[in-house]
Image (cartoon, helix red, strand yellow):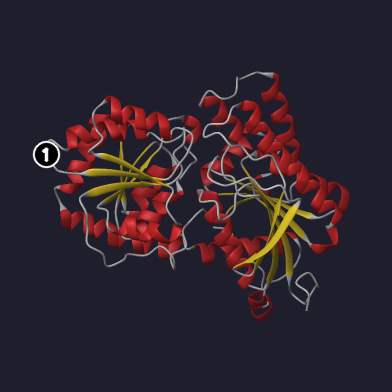
């Protein structure tokens, strides 16, 4: 049977995401895992993504209109869009990247509207919603908005967007239209859902469902490797992370304990952080291995003593939980985080992490305190692993998402048909 032919009980889902493997961003792995498990649970899934180009400069340019491939039972279609080349693209180049892909996705979804029943758009960037909005209005498709953060609010707090500017106003109008039209708004945390309802008070909280970030616990697990005297940050090196203060803490830490800091990944502020390391003479303590294959990440985490998940202390980031915090716990090591809101709740409810204040002294004190009690660290690592297996397995999260989609499409899952009941399946 052709992948797009309807079979009884099969959901045909079109996913529009700015990032997808072989890119190595947090959302790339999240969408990949989610679609993989949806495909395994009787869903036909198509993913639209641009040609790989993130982080900028990591991939060669491609000029084909579209390329098709299969990945874990999911049909991936890479569409032509603007591909930034410089490591830290300027505003114009970023906007060309953010806008060209969703407009191409609008065209593809319009010409292929018979191939899917539900469209799911993943944001940020917010412009992926163009494809969902057009599919909803023109073809009456069910639309799931997958929202990972309040991109406009975060852009203002980080200084990329001026509050009260024309661009902010037009972006708010567009976002309001998307939230109003969407059949379901999936959010990664409860706080994020509440922020959306507070910001856009016309949005019904009933359409907001928590579909957590989580981790693929079959891929990330504790490996039996020799421990090294190192702590690790593995992920996007971006403006929301408070990595500078962790770097500056390393000199103080090494006065009491020989420890290295591995910052694995790439991103907008990598060069800036490398400058801070050089200016403070920390080249023997802080290392940047760059992008590493995803298959190597569980090993690097497992051989580290502590995972670092530092968020800046901003009101607009209180909804956020970095993917890396789940990955550290899944690999059986405790994490040190910073920030307020959801990341603090995760550390406290899981028992797998500790939250530091956002200063070099506090990071140093927190890390040294953990290193002084290895039994406590081992206990936290084991507790964190059990916690994510029970509450944040991406396999179960994908099944919960499917249940929610079945709810908005008035379908029942196989389990419902057997039990004769229906349920929302949200966390």
- Residue 427, x across and y down, in percent: 54, 57
The one of 192 and 21 positioned closer to us in this rendering = 21
Q: What residue is drawn where x is 39% and y is 59%?
A: 296
Work out which quarter of the rendered image holds the N terminus and state it. Answer: bottom right
Q: What residue is drawn where x is 23% and y is 59%?
A: 379
Q: Is residue 281 above or below residue 183?
A: above
Give the residue number, with chain letter if any, for mark 1.
256
The one of 73 and 217 positioned closer to us in this rendering = 73
- Residue 148, x across and y down, in percent: 57, 45
Q: Is residue 318 above or below residue 281?
A: below
Q: Is residue 399 visible?
A: no
Q: Quadrant of residue 114?
A: bottom right
Residue at the limit of the structure toward the left, as seen here: 256
The one of 1 and 10 positioned closer to us in this rendering = 1
The one of 25 and 62 positioned closer to us in this rendering = 62
Residue at the limit of the structure toward the bottom, as seen here: 418
- Residue 407, x across and y down, in percent: 70, 62
Q: In the rendered view, does 123 fall on the left or right side of 176? A: left
Q: What residue is drawn where x is 18% and y is 48%?
A: 371
């Amino acid at each position: 049977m052709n992948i797009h032919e309807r079979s009884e009980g099969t959901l045909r889902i079109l996913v529009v995401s700015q990032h997808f493997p072989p890119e190595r961003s947090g959302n790339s792995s999240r969408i990949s895992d989610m679609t993989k498990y949806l495909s395994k649970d009787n869903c036909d899934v198509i993913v639209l993504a641009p040609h790989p180009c993130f982080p900028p400069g990591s991939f060669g340019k491609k000029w084909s209109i579209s390329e098709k491939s299969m990945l874990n039972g999911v049909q991936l279609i890479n569409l032509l869009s603007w591909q930034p080349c410089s490591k830290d693209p300027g505003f114009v180049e970023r906007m060309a990247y953010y806008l060209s892909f969703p407009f191409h996705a609008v065209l593809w979804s319009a010409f292929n509207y018979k191939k899917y029943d539900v469209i799911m758009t993943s944001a940020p960037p917010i412009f992926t919603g163009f494809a969902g909005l057009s599919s909803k209005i023109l073809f009456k498709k069910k639309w799931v908005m997958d929202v990972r953060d309040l991109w406009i609010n975060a852009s203002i707090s980080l200084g990329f967007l001026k509050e009260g500017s024309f661009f902010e106003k037009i972006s708010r109008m567009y976002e309001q239209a998307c939230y109003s039209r969407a059949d379901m708004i999936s959010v990664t945390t409860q706080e994020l859902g509440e922020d959306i309802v507070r910001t856009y008070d016309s949005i019904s909280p009933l359409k907001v469902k928590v579909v957590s970030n989580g981790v693929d616990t079959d891929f990330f697990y504790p490996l039996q490797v020799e421990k090294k005297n190192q702590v690790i940050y593995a992920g996007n090196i971006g403006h929301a992370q408070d990595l500078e203060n962790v770097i500056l803490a390393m000199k103080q830490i090494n006065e009491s304990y020989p420890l290295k800091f591995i910052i694995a990944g790439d991103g907008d502020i990598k060069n800036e952080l490398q400058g801070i390391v050089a200016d403070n003479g920390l080249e023997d303590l802080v290392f940047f291995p760059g992008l590493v294959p995803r298959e190597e990440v569980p090993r690097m985490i497992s051989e580290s003593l502590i995972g670092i998940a530092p968020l800046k202390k901003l009101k607009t980031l209180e909804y956020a939980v970095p993917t890396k915090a789940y990955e550290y716990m899944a690999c059986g090591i405790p994490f040190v985080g910073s920030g307020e809101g959801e990341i603090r709740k995760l550390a406290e409810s899981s028992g797998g992490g500790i939250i530091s204040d956002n200063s070099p002294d506090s990071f140093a004190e927190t890390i040294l305190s953990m290193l002084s009690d290895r039994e406590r660290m081992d206990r936290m690592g084991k507790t964190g692993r059990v916690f994510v297996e029970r509450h944040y397995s991406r396999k179960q999260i994908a099944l919960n998402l499917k249940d929610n989609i079945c709810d908005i499409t008035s379908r029942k899952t196989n389990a419902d048909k057997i039990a004769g009941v229906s349920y929302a399946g949200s966390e």
